[in-house]
């Protein structure tokens, strides 16, 4: 499989895997793994909404003026300590009469009245007050083993005279986080079949407004629930009484202790209750009517019901994005970022992924804070980063493999500088593809003179040992001057300077390399002579010109080499050179005449050329650092 196609497929697979992880968490039921599912994402958005509110950047209705139509009567710690609990129902009758006299329009009790009082007169007194004051009573719901809705209705004596009833589902696990239906249609079976049940908040608002709540127009999640905005509630300890006091920002009429209502006159209560929807419920710690909310811990369930009523009255709701859009984003964005790794370098792709994730988070939170539009953030953002991390890891492993491949291919022939240059390319495999390019290069050949005759008197082991010692030293010198060893042809060495990329000093580097090789051969000869080994001299030829450079061979075995007329010229020159000579062509001399002293020779005829080629025998570097002529060979 082609490398690019394989990289594309692996990239798509890794990006898709990251998206699949996010998609799986998105579609988990709310009660399953809530620390990482949609509930966790909603909690993160609520935290952002709170932070924006502290900076004055929140939603204008969410952080603006409080609702002037809402008031709250709290059975708080002070009431609990003074009057105990449960309160006699005659107390609630008194509260209703006082609120009616103060001008309240509707009263909603976030209290269950399911059982009759021990004293029937208490229920009768409360029922009488319910007749006089439009009131909504709460009742709990449960689900039967058959999946049908079960109800525990208020005491019939009270339900029959109440203006309305509404279910309260906030006590169910995750009730706040997963939202609440504003209405439920019961099944066609059971005692309460084919009924339309309203939530306490919806029933209270419908009674207050004198018309049904337009539930169809309310944004809901995929399960038909209204997602609740967090109630802006705070609590502090009253040092004088030692009781916990709750404050809130959405009920414009404020919060009054029930014990204070009992001690007040209707005229005192008129600013608080006149024309308002008044919620009555518990906030005392010992009564335990609390709901867990994001960012504020546990708050009274009374405040949550009042908060939902506030949203229904003012018509602002959290708009959840369609599930298909969240899933499309969590799948597509990681894939797009993963594909980015195929277009740019790994470092740039990682930076792009971080910028893209940050941009998505900014847009996402802006939509939530300014428009109350909820797109998934946690799972999409993490999938983007996870996809980028997966592909980055793959790229690092792949690049390491490519580096090993290039190193193995070239390491035995090319200087470290050339290998490093190839590895710095975006696609080293492309650099090594089976194709050639026209470049200007300097070609070097060297050949041992009289090797065939010399080897006749040597054992094969001695020949290999001495050749390997010779080749080792020559290759070091070639590498040191930026060349690479193209091939060994018996006792002949072919090297190329300027591969795979050209520099202005290629010809000079080739000549300097040849000079050092001849000097090293003299050193080796002295060592061999002392060891009783055969000595030899080497003739060298160098030519500069245009060649075709690239990989030659088959996909299973290739050779990085050069071909062309100028390669043939270099081969002709090393055949002309005698032992100890370096013969260079006129094109090479033109580029290095500033550094060498030469002796012109008779022109050489080369097959394929129309005219003889001027050649030169390099005699010395012009000067060393001290200005003294440097001879290649002994005079």
Image (cartoon, grey):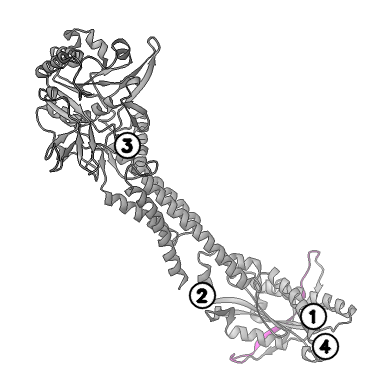
Q: Secondary structure at mark 3?
A: loop
Task: Name the N-terminal-most of marks 3 and 4.
Answer: 3
Instruction: Give the Cα distance between marks 2 and 3.
Output: 60 Å
Q: Is residue 515 visible?
A: no
Residue of label 4:
458
Tell me whether the residue at label 4 lies in contact with that at label 2, contact meaning CB atoms closer than 8 angstroms: no
Residue of label 1:
466
Instruction: Give the Cα distance between marks 3 and 4.
Output: 92 Å
Task: Name the N-terminal-most of marks 4 and 1.
Answer: 4
Image location of residue 443, percent across then percent down: 64, 79
Image location of residue 521, percent across then percent down: 80, 77
In the displayed structure image, the side of residue 510 where residue 625 appears, left or right: right
Q: Quadrant of the C terminus?
A: bottom right
Q: Quadrant of the N terminus?
A: bottom left
Looking at the image, which residue is at 15% across and 35% down?
197
Residue of label 3:
174
Q: Which residues are magenta?
A: 607-626
């Amino acid at each position: 499989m082609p490398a690019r196609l394989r990289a594309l497929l692996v990239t798509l697979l890794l990006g898709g895997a990251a998206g699949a992880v996010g998609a799986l968490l998105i579609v988990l039921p709310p009660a399953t793994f809530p620390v990482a599912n949609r509930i966790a994402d909603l909690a993160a958005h609520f935290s952002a909404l709170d932070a924006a509110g502290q900076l004055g950047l929140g939603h204008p209705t969410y952080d603006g003026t409080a609702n002037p139509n809402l008031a709250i009567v709290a059975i708080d710690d002070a009431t609990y300590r003074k009057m105990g609990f449960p309160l006699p129902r005659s107390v609630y009758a008194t509260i209703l009469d006082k609120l009616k006299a103060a001008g309240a329009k509707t009263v909603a009790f976030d209290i269950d009245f399911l059982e009759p009082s021990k004293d029937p007169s208490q229920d009768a007194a409360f029922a009488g007050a319910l007749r006089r004051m439009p009131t909504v009573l709460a009742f709990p719901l449960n689900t039967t083993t058959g999946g049908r809705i079960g109800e525990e209705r208020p005491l019939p004596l009270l339900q029959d005279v109440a203006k309305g009833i509404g279910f309260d589902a906030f006590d169910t696990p995750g009730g706040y986080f997963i939202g609440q239906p504003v209405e439920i249609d019961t099944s066609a079976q059971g005692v309460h079949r084919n009924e339309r049940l309203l939530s306490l908040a919806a029933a209270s608002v419908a009674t207050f407004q004198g018309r049904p709540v337009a539930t169809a127009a309310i944004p809901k999640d995929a399960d038909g629930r209204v997602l609740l905005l967090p109630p802006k509630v705070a609590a502090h300890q009253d040092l004088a009484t030692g009781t916990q006091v709750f404050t809130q920002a959405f009920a414009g009429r404020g919060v009054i202790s029930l014990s204070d209502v009992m001690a007040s006159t209707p005229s005192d209560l008129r600013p608080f209750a006149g024309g308002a929807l008044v919620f009555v419920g518990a906030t005392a710690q010992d009564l335990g009517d609390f709901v867990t909310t994001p960012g504020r811990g546990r708050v009274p369930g009374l405040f949550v019901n009042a908060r939902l009523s506030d949203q229904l009255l003012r018509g602002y709701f959290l708009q959840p994005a369609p599930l298909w859009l969240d899933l499309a984003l969590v799948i597509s964005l990681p894939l797009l970022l993963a594909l980015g790794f195929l277009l740019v370098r790994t470092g740039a792709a990682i930076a792009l992924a971080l910028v893209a994730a940050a941009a998505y988070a900014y847009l996402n939170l802006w939509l939530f804070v300014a428009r109350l539009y909820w797109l998934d953030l946690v799972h999409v953002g993490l999938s983007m980063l996870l996809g980028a991390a997966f592909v980055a890891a793959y790229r690092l492993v792949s690049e390491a493999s490519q580096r090993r491949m290039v190193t193995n291919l070239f390491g035995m022939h090319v200087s470290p500088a050339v290998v490093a240059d190839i590895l710095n390319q975006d696609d080293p495999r492309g650099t090594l593809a089976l194709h050639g390019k026209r470049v200007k290069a300097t070609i070097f050949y060297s050949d041992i003179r009289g090797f065939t005759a010399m080897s006749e008197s040597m054992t094969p082991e001695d020949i290999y040992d001495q050749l390997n010692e010779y080749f080792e030293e020559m290759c070091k010198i070639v590498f040191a001057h930026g060349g690479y060893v193209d091939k060994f042809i018996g006792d002949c060495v072919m090297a190329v300077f300027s591969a795979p990329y050209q520099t202005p000093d290629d010809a000079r580097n080739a000549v300097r390399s040849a000079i050092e090789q001849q000097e090293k051969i003299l050193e080796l000869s002295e060592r061999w002579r002392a060891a009783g080994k055969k000595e030899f001299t080497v003739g060298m030829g160098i030519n500069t010109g245009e060649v075709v450079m690239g990989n030659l061979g088959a996909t299973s075995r290739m050779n990085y080499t050069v071909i062309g007329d100028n390669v043939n010229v270099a081969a002709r020159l090393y055949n002309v050179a005698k032992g100890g000579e370096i013969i260079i062509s006129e094109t090479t001399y033109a580029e290095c005449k500033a550094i060498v002293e030469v002796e012109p020779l008779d022109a050489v005829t080369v097959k394929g050329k129309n005219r003889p080629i001027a050649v030169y025998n390099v005699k010395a570097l012009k000067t060393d650092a001290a200005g003294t002529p440097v001879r290649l060979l002994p005079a």
